Amino acid sequence: MTSAAQAAPAETDLQPAREPLSEATAKPARSLGPLRMIWRETAKYPRQIAFALVALLITASATLAIPAGFHLIIDKGFAKGGDTAEIARWFRYLLGIVALLGLGTAVRFYYVSWLGERVVADIRYAVQSNLMRLSPAFFEENSPSEISSRMTSDTTLIEQVVGTTVSVALRNLIMGIGGIIRLFMLAPKLTGGLLLGISLVVLPLTFFGRRLRNVSRTSQDRVADIGSLVSEVLGGMRVVQAFNQEGRELDRFSSAVEATFATARRRILLRAIMTATAIVAIFGSIVMLVWEGALQVAQGSITGGTIFEMVVTSGIVAGSFGALTEVYGDLLRGAGAAGRLNELLAEKPSIAAPARPLALPSPARGKLAFEGVTFRYPTRLEVAALADFTLTVEPGETVAIVGPSGAGKTTLFQLAERFYDPQAGTIKLDGVPLTAVDPADIRRRMALVPQEGQLFAASARDNLRYGNWDASDEAIWEAARAANAETFLRALPDGLDTFLGEGGARLSGGQRQRVAIARAVLREAPILLLDEATSALDAESERLVQDALDKLMKGRTTLVIAHRLATVRAADRIVVLDGGRMTESGTHSQLIKRGGLYARLASLQFDDKKLAAAGID
């Protein structure tokens, strides 16, 4: 689809549909490269990083100092015939190290945890901010529940990487390198043998690590699949139970869970093999080191304190490098999560303001013109939703759009609000092409009343002022009166402060629709878009809603989509769409007399006697 910066009234080549995220995420990460995104976010907090690194160095050094302390106790304290004062001196030294270790650990934990939570919060905000810029086409091609999974499970993994994994990796790396340096200081020859054993870990890590990367990414995708499936089934539970499909949905869930488990089992097996290989190589080298050291102690070449420190330090070194193998797997999972989130951050809006947007005329007139418009949805390029469509709606005119399902009625609204750009033709608002205007300016001049009043899990006040966030309570009540919503709103337990529940669950369908109308009233826009606003209501609710709509339409340019033709008979003009093309246009009486598609639709809805009484044959 043509971007806003490139869109032009002239016909453009059709662009292939975007690859859905669900397919893109199936491609495994090849390296730890995606972690660069996490580092960019973390680097915004240098002071906290510095505190964490200093604490990390202190705790790592203190850990390595403990075996050195026991070395001194054995060689300095016990060597003097068990002098209690000398022994106490070195134990006080050890207690000081332990206290320093505890303090450093607390400081390190605080700052790395702070960084983890802060970075996750920043990434979530950045992703959501970018998502808010994307056009509806993106969310039609990609599952919102899958995106939601990325915002929860993937960010949790990133929090673990920043707040735990990286800290553990650095600490063990410092202790491993520091331990090796200390071992070289104590016994260079013996340490050389230890390093030879540790080096043997590199080859299996490289082999298994590559496979583990792929499996880790696939494992994350399988978890996301479960989240999407749960969201879909729970959201449609009434339909599931109404058609007795609980068993089938449970089977689908079971298959998804088993697929996730199978992938996780492969990941666990690879990590287990990596860990076992590392342990055998490292601890085998330590055993050989201690063996040789014990022989040298027996020969008097080194002291008992030296061999004790070497054994404990070797254990620290082995544990550090062993932990690094575990950490590597976590880093790979974090890299997969970062890659998935980075895809959302990198997604560019297909509809955006041009580099130099034109200003719409002021004051607004409300004239809307479609000139030779042809449009195909990105996911259905083979079918034209609109073909060479031309229509001019004059300021203050009410135009009804009717036709069978799939005729292109809703597409007109999508294009009018510039959620999409046509592949050919031009759409103008007050004489200015929409592609030359900031989309936000276009939408400020339009108020939408959808088929089902979409409400949010918030108070009645916040739902009402969604059309104009700065509206006063007086303006809100005035809009509620205009929408025939004042009575039931005042009857709510806490009035405008009443929480309406998810999707406005505490209100009936008719009440939700009237709140949506009041929201449109507060918008005070010159163009009104009514998308089958009464189609899902009972007779009483429809009458109340229609009365509210009649008040709202006065003085505004209005486009009405309706299946119930009784609601559009009074329109200034009725446009009939079929297969994306305008087939008829005129008043209700004119179209009935022509005997075309509109007349056939009307004959299905209106009683013949009523038509005759109206003077229509």
Image (cartoon, rainbow, N blue to C red):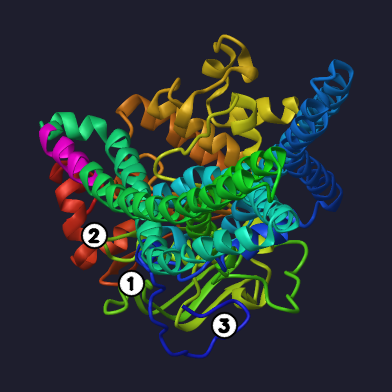
Query: Hey, which quadrant is residue 28 in on the image?
Result: bottom left
Q: Which residue is mark 2?
A: 404
The answer to whether any part of residue 590 appears in the image is yes
Checking the image for residue 7, the label placed there is 3
Residue 312 against residue 21 in the figure, above or below: above
Answer whether labels 1 and 3 touch (C-beta < 8 Å). Answer: no
The CA distance from mark 2 to mark 3 is 30 Å
Please state which of the two labelled residues, at mark 2 or mark 1, is closer to the viewer: 1
> From the viewer's perspective, is 13 left or right of 189?
left
> In percent of the image, x 20 and y 65: which residue is there?
597
**Dot 1 lies on which element?**
loop
Residue 570 against residue 234 in the figure, above or below: below
Q: Amino acid at mark 3?
A: Ala
Give 587 or 405, whichever is nearer the viewer.
405
Query: Hey, which quadrant is residue 385 in on the image?
Result: bottom left
User: Which contiguous range is marked in magenta?
Assistant: 247-256
Lower position in the chain sequence, tag 2 or tag 3: 3
Crowding near the residue tagged with mark 1, few <14, some 14–19, many ≥20 C-alpha atoms within 10 Å: many
Q: Is residue 252 magenta?
A: yes
Please state which of the two labelled residues, at mark 2 or mark 3, is closer to the viewer: 3
> From the viewer's perspective, is 32 left or right of 85?
left
Quadrant of the rendering where the C terminus is positioned = bottom left
Residue 95 against residue 580 in the figure, above or below: above
> In percent of the image, x 40 and y 23: which residue is there?
508
Lower position in the chain sequence, tag 2 or tag 1: 1
The answer to whether any part of residue 469 appears in the image is no
**Image coordinates for residue 475, horizontal then vertical, percent:** 72, 31
> From the viewer's perspective, is 536 left or right of 556?
left
